[in-house]
Amino acid sequence: MQELICNIEFDLEDDGTYLAKLRTEIGGLREYSGRTFEEVLNQVMMELEEEFV
């Protein structure tokens, strides 16, 4: 049995900014942005660690 625990979308905006949209049942929809993909990925990872650990 599979259960969806989160949905994450990553986009590169026209101005070169990276955008992540994170949706979970507990936290709802949140958005993160940064100048590098690593910066945005780290923000998403920290948020998921706080929510699921």
Image (cartoon, rainbow, N blue to C red):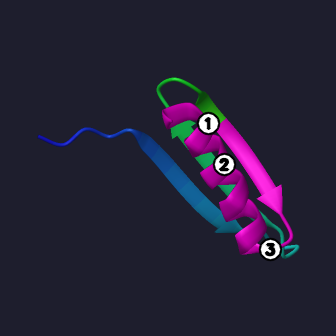
Q: Residue at x 44, y 42 (%)?
A: 6
Secondary element at image label 3: loop
Crowd rating for badge 1 (residues with CA inside 10 Å; few <14, some 14–19, many 20+): few
Name which residue type carries label 2. Met
Q: Residue at x 70, y 60 (%)?
A: 42
Q: Where is residue 40 in the image (x, y as percent from the top left)?
A: 73, 61
Q: Position of residue 32 (x, y in %)?
A: 75, 50
Residue 1 seen: yes
24 w.r.t. 38: above or below: above
Between the C-alphas of marks 3 and 1, the distance is 22 Å
Name which residue type carries label 1. Glu
The answer to whether residue 40 is left or right of residue 49 is right
**Residue 46's disc number:** 2
Q: Verify CB contact (< 8 Å) between mark 2 and mark 1.
A: yes
Q: Which residue is nearer to you in this view: 3 or 16?
A: 3
Q: Residue at x 57, y 43 (%)?
A: 49
34 w.r.t. 29: above or below: below
Secondary element at image label 1: helix
Q: Mark 1 points at which residue?
A: 50
- Sequence-earlier tag: 3 or 2: 3
Secondary element at image label 2: helix
> What span is in magenta?
30-53
Q: Mark 3 points at which residue?
A: 36
Answer whether residue 26 is magenta in the image. Answer: no
Residue that lies at the very extreme toward the front in this rendered image? 53
Q: In which quarter of the image is residue 14?
A: bottom right
Residue that lies at the very extreme toward the left in this rendered image? 1
The answer to whether residue 20 is left or right of residue 7 is right
Q: Position of residue 53 (x, y in %)?
A: 50, 36
